[in-house]
Amino acid sequence: LENVTGLDRVRELGARESGLAVVFTTRADGTGQASIVNAGVVDHPVTGEPVVAFVARGEVKKLTNLRARPRLTLVFRSGWEWVAVEGETDLAGPDHPLAGFEPRGVPRLLRDVYAAAVGGTEEDWAELDEAMATERQTAVLVRPDRVYSNPRS
Amino acid sequence: VASLDRVRELVVREHGLAVVTTQRADGSMPASVVNAGVLDHPVTGEPVVAFVARGGTRKLANLRARPRATVVFRVGWEWVAVEGTAELVGPDDPFAGFDSGAVPKLLRDVFVAAGGTHDDWNEYDRVMTAERRTAVLVRPDRVYSNPG
């Protein structure tokens, strides 16, 4: 899939499932560690390009994996329909400064990611700023380099 | 603690739909969606997570070179992941101790374990053979779910 078409598909399937996606990061031994996140499409806060993003709590294994091996695979599925996104990752959060991005912009970015993934507006999420900070929540931004789907679609 | 019983439960609720990832030579992880279920390994008898893969796919090429897979079953927010060594049993993948004449029966068993039903098993066998379908058996060494 062309990336633009593919990200439209991500938006479409994501909207049907509250942004639920399976994410695979890579352990040091090369095996794939799975978890579930709410993800959506936002503009990269530095480059402006569309990226697939989700929020990770401070000390989870997937962040450990991504610090060492900054690449992942995400799959959005609704019934039989699915779309996979692979790409390199940038982290932006209280413990993960992103070059060119002001740390004080983190709360706004986290709100934008939640709004893109789960729904609602950026303002709706503002009341959770404190909880997000306490949990050292970090935005994971995936720059898509492979987007694909069912062979027959 | 997550277990294969949990896998069986989610299989029933979501037609066995599962996201599976393998590994490319460069270490990146291609993903796809399959119908998978739990059945007894045809040689060892241990419970495994199994699905059917079409012949000639990159998934099979990856699994022949790097025989390991992660399979994730999800229903809404609930999920369970199974990781393990993948064994292949099919027309292009003979398996020690398994009679190749029994491959069609195994492919039927995998289909049924994933919640499938078929009106015409002879037709099913014919399509499986024509597409050189192969059973992928994942011997679980890690089974896990939501942290909470």
Image (cartoon, coloured by chain):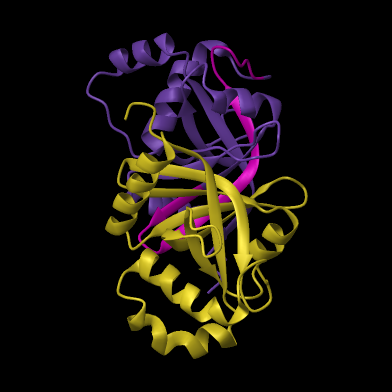
Q: Which residues are magenta?
A: B72-95
Quadrant of image for the N terminus of chain A: top left
The picture places residue B59, in percent across and down from the top left corner, at 55, 28
Quadrant position of residue A15: bottom left
The picture places residue A79, in percent across and down from the top left corner, at 30, 46
Q: Is residue A84 above or below residue A36?
A: above
**Toward the viewer: A20 or B89?**
A20
Chain A colour as displayed = yellow
Please check the rendered image and state whether residue B24 is part of the magenta-colored stretch, yes or no. no
Point 41% across, 54% down: residue: B74
Chain B colour as displayed = purple
**Toward the viewer: A109 or B61?**
A109
B8 vs A121, left or right, is right
Quadrant position of residue A116: bottom left
Point 46% across, 21% down: residue: B54
Quadrant position of residue A65: bottom right
